Amino acid sequence: MSKTWLTNFDAENQDFWENQGGENIAWKTLWITTGALTFSFATWFIMSVLVVKLNGIGFKFTSDQLFWLAAMPGLSGGIFRIINTFLLPIYGTRHIVSFTTFLKILPCVGIGFAVMDTSTPFWIFMILAFLTGIGGGDFSSYMPSTNLFFPRRLKGTALGLQAGIGNFGVSLVQFITPILIGVGVVGTSSQFTNIDAKEVEEMFIQLGEEQVTQSFMLLDKETQILLMNKFDQEKAKMTFHENIPSEPIDFFVGLPVSLQAKSFTYIHPKKAEAILTSFQTGKNGVKNSTIYLQNSAFWFIPFLIIIGIVSWISLRSIPMKASFKEQLDIFGDKHTWYCTLVYLMTFGGFAGLSAAFPMLIKSVYGGFPDAPDPLMFAFYGPLIGSASRVLFGFAADRFGGGVLTTISGIGLTVGTILLVSMGLLTPNSLDQFPMFVGIMLSLFFFTGIGNASTFRQFPIIFQHNPRQAAGVIGWTAGVAAFGPFIFSMLILLSMNVSGNSNAFFIGLIIFSVIATFVNWNFYHKKGCVRPS
């Protein structure tokens, strides 16, 4: 046995599996690569955490730019996953896991230094956001690798464990960041500014109409127009009885005082601070705190170094030689495309919602008095999605993947319908927030079920060719990794056009229905083409 390649490995041979070390090699590989994958997901989603804090420490990014920063890792993650799809047969498990783990150190170092300097340009952040996609890309090498190491009867369990525990990396970064940024370890501190809508409302009540108007006039014309466009168009029509003023100042004066106060939460925090503190009572509306945002990136570095070294020393690769051209045969099978559609619904939904959830909380509920901190709730989604993926990996081995994927699709469809029909994306008060969070978490739960079941299905759907099965797992994961990009960009488009995200979620309902039908028709119903 060489330092890299195993000379013989047959997971389906019971004697080899039980008596010749096959089982030990497989489980050792699984636990090492799963640890590496957890930090891959964590580094992939760094930007989804940072975007809600950047302007508060002095960066001057627009809402569109912040959505782009949240979306870019999804775009690059998808690209890197497609590349990784074809690397495993060429380089093997050991080289890919080790090298990609070390590569992830680059964006972590870059982001750590970038956030300490508020003059860092947007394009630098975009490059760094693109590089975090390395963490999303190597999934398409890890999962096909694990598929090779385990017998068919354990594939669902092994893949469910690896992907599910790996997915915990998303909730890990969203959970631990608020804790770490409050502790000074490395680098300089930043003053984070947050606008309290409740205190601003109290201030406006005390000031009276004339001085409230004066506060709005202190804003430049561009910001005034921006604020006017921020309001949901349907609600604006109701407020002004269909006669929406064309001038921003008339629009602002005509708003109830609660909405006038809410509008200041849409302004750049430092700009709002300068205006509000020019009034004697305005200081209460500005909340400043000291944070160390660089910690959100720097803390990964020692773990990545350790995991990279352990991977290089301990991992071995199963020979699966195939040229790039030979691997393209998966695209001639229609089931490659059906599986891609289904996995875009399940993992694309999980990753897309994970990336968009913090910004969605901030943009939909951030303007209310006592608005929630997005990072205090956002991590629950990936946590639940990851946990259900682990738990239902075992269920998929027992009951089959097809039925669970159908259940997943139905759950996603019903949950999304409730979000739209109950007005939770266009709320009138913060009282709707608990229901919004509850339904969003249910969506994560159902994506987890689907993520577990689909990875039980794909090896069975392509059981006639294990190499193709590995390729399809990598390819579908690659396309689904575009979820964060697709979700963030379409939510942004929906908000820019209509002032809310309803249109996006209606589209998600339609897509989920189509993907669920494809799964039921080809892989679940009695007498289907490839039962799984």
Image (cartoon, rainbow, N blue to C red):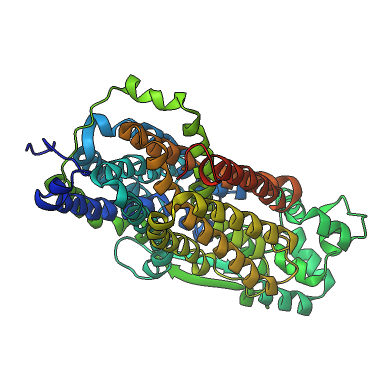
Residue 311 showing in the rendered view: yes
Residue 77 showing in the rendered view: no
Measured along the vertical axis of the image, is residue 321 above or below residue 382?
above
**Quadrant housing the C terminus:** top left
Residue name at image x 67 percent, y 66 percent: 367
Relative to the observer, which residue lies in front, 216 or 369? 369
Identify the residue at the far top of this view: 325
Residue name at image x 68 percent, y 72 percent: 430
How many marks on residues?
Answer: 0
Is 341 left, or right, of 158 in this rendering?
Answer: right
**Quadrant housing the N terminus:** top left
Identify the residue at the far left of this view: 1
Relative to the observer, which residue lies in front, 361 or 480? 480
Is 513 left, or right, of 120 in this rendering?
Answer: right
Relative to the observer, which residue lies in front, 74 or 150? 150
Residue 365 rendering spot, x and y as whole percentages: 65, 65
Residue 508 rendering spot, x and y as whole percentages: 64, 48
Residue 432 rendering spot, x and y as whole percentages: 69, 71
Is 99 left, or right, of 167 in this rendering?
Answer: left
Residue 89 rendering spot, x and y as whole percentages: 26, 31
Residue name at image x 34 percent, y 25 percent: 327
